[in-house]
Amino acid sequence: MRGISKSFHGIPANQDISFSIESGEILGLLGENGAGKTTLMNILYGLYQPDAGEIRINDAPVRIHNPLESIALGIGMVHQHFMLIQNHSVLENIALSHKDTPFFFPTVKIREKIENFSASFDFNIDLTKKVWQLSAGEQQRVEIIKALLNGADLLILDEPTSVLTPQEIKELISILKEMKAKGHMVIFISHKLDEIMDICDRVLVLQKGKIAGSALTRDTDKISLARMMVGRDVVFNIQREKIVRGNQILSVEHLNVMGDKGLPVLKDISFEIFENEIFGVAGVSGNGQRELAEAVTGIRKAESGKIRINDRDITNTSPRHIYDQGVSHVPEERIRFGIAPGLFLYDNAILKQHHLKKFSKRYFLKYKDVKDHAKNLMDDFNVSAHSIHSQIRNLSGGNIQKLILGREISEKPQLLVASHPTYGLDIGATEFMRNHLLKLRKTGSAVLLFSEDLEEIFELCDRIAVIFDGEFMAILDSGDSRLNDIGLMMAGSKRI
Amino acid sequence: MIKFNVTDRYDISAGRSFMTNLLSLVAGLFMIGLVFLFLGVNPFYALFKIFSGSFGSFYGFKETLTKAIPLILIGSGLTLAFRAKFWNIGAEGQLLMGAIFAAWISLFLGDHLPSYIMVPLMFLAGFTGGALWGIIPAILKIRFSINEVISTLMLNYICADFLTMLIVGPWKGSTRFGFPGTDNFPDSAILGLISGSRIHYATFILSILCAVILCIVIYKTRFGYEARVVGENPDAGRYAGIDFLKTTLILMIISGGLAGLAGVGEVAGIHHYLGYPAAVSSGYGFTAIIVAWLAKLNPLLTLVSGIFFAGILVGGDAVQISLGLPAATVGIVNGILLICLIMGDYFLKNKITLTIAKP
């Protein structure tokens, strides 16, 4: 790719980017959120047209108008969110995307092909299983098979490890190594330094749409890559002071909760959280974290068990009652739950507090106070927006997250339930969020933190629970050496 | 190759909003003109007739205001329901139910009570009737997840047939010579008119009052805030601890109740008896949907859009008489205007740029 530029609404997403990749090479594409990684790859895959620049394959210039053309040119892409049909079998999904699938009895011919193929690559997948029965790692392998069967020489993987367990990541790496040995090229998009160092031969760092640098991984180290990525030095270890924990705030006893499909999702969970404590729940998403957060905050009904705040039973009371007991919540899918997108910033600044005396008097809202509150939140939590009269949908994800966090902790909660509070944020915003969580801990609040990011869990938490399939595999202190097996616990193969 | 790029438009200014609506209306009038052309009528003359019939004379304007009363009442109630994304298509039925309740009160109590008790009582009964009819789909939606578009629409037919059953059956008047319809309401149950017109002033004042009050409800109160949050994002509403059943019930009581009030105005102010459903309402419950939409779901603006559409109804009658066009013409005019307004909304919320790429 040479001199690629692309802008949206006049804001450049890619500026004059040039790079090349040779056969048998794994190229890492590193950058913060919004650095332009995905845009660049979408151009290569034919989803976007570049404003300037050209793409050359084997030295011949090509124009790629759509993904069909890029597939024909030997480019395959595995998106961050899998493009599979949940109710179809693996075989049907592969047949659907394959270019030589016959119209009648599509699966018969393909089956043979896949079986030959996956034997040579050591993919281990039951072709007759429906996609919804597969783990995230298996679904990813299906996506990779899809791309390779279509003759992909160049495979683009967009944040492939974000949904995998450590064991699954290892399996992915071995597949990638095999592909490399067979002469395939891989572009590996990530913002996790460790993986890039592990997997890639060469790394290209993007920052604000421009190339900030590139290096062979064997000639560089994490620190200098991180500097390239954010354009300044990054402190990797946030200092967590030693604080003696206080009184018990939350206690959960033998909690059982049903999931959306009416099946039991949380099984007999018990734990407590104390003042001045951050309690982390580690695990691959979909193992009951969301249901636990919703049960504690009152959005989801508990089938049995007790949830107490300050020794007061709040099991199955209303979300508002629980909020009034001092429980705040930074929800997992912030756009889906945390905001009303068409309303103004100041409307959203009081989403859970509008019933408080502070903001409402009998039937009326005190909009003057509400607006002042919104202004303060914007200042205190560095929310950058045009004004408090902006529609919240026009804010970036990071700013929305800052506003939600600010809103949830501005009332000094006893307990903050924070689900993936830094997911999808850049390093600067992540640091900001984490420091605020530590500040809460210092001022005597309890925090229940859900995260898939182990680095975050280790940095912030006093105690760590590992959740798998709706059960806690262990609850350990942060210093406990048994945490080395956290990967095994997250995958359900070890219990302490 | 011509390519359309569609992107979200972030800052929508009031001026742009106004111009977009104006252009949508012009585009709608242009298409309506084509329809007139197809019917063999000079489109300019027909459009001139529509607006001169409704706004061009004092008599016409009084008629326009008369028809604007139910449109404003229902339309402002609908803005509230639509804000919460509760698609109440059943205002027609709620209006009829209000009319039935008012008729019931006036027929059975009217002879015994003086007017100053009777009139408020009728309004109260009408509000209750419309509200009850509005509560049904609200409960169906929240408790049983039944789509409100279907249920409100179907309840229209149930109510219309229930009304028909009453007027051909138990309530058939002895003075009607066997024709369906109740007896005339007693004098105490007849609304006073502004002299020289058919404007029943009690309802007229009520409609302006309702538009103003609803504006305050939506923008200033806790309930209005909760309704808007629920409409923007129900999941966020649940997360914020908003009681869906309560919110939806209240807003449908208001929306249905206002439609009920409009029903009272129609039977007690204009017809003075309960006749066939089509005679009672002439589709105000449906036209009010367009009224609410044209007002951009702002109750105060229904005062303007209500009068505008009332003008089209009156003007439609005028072209029917003077140009001999079919009665359905007004329906076509309304439909085209609504479609153009909705399409205009798309162009307001999205920015469309056209690029011509060389192949």
Image (cartoon, grey):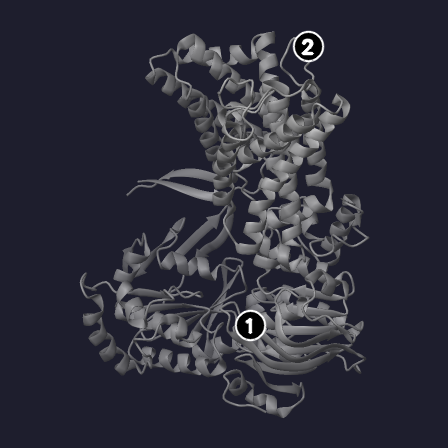
Kindly state the secondary structure of the residue where label 1 is placed: strand
Q: Is residue A407 above or below residue B62?
A: below
The label number, if any, that marks residue A422 in the structure image = none
Amino acid residing under circle 1: Met
Residue visible at 76% across and 62% down? A324
* Left or right: B221 as drawn, with respect to A233: right
Chain for numbered disc 1: A
The C terminus of chain A, quarter of image: bottom right
Q: Is residue A383 above or below residue A328?
A: above
> Label 1 belongs to which residue?
A258
Q: Can residue A1 be spotted in the picture?
A: no
Q: Nearer the viewer, residue B265 or A195?
A: B265
The label number, if any, that marks residue B195 in the structure image = 2
Q: Where is residue A310 drawn, in percent x and y? A: 79, 74
Chain for numbered disc 2: B
Q: Where is residue B118 drawn, in percent x and y? A: 73, 26
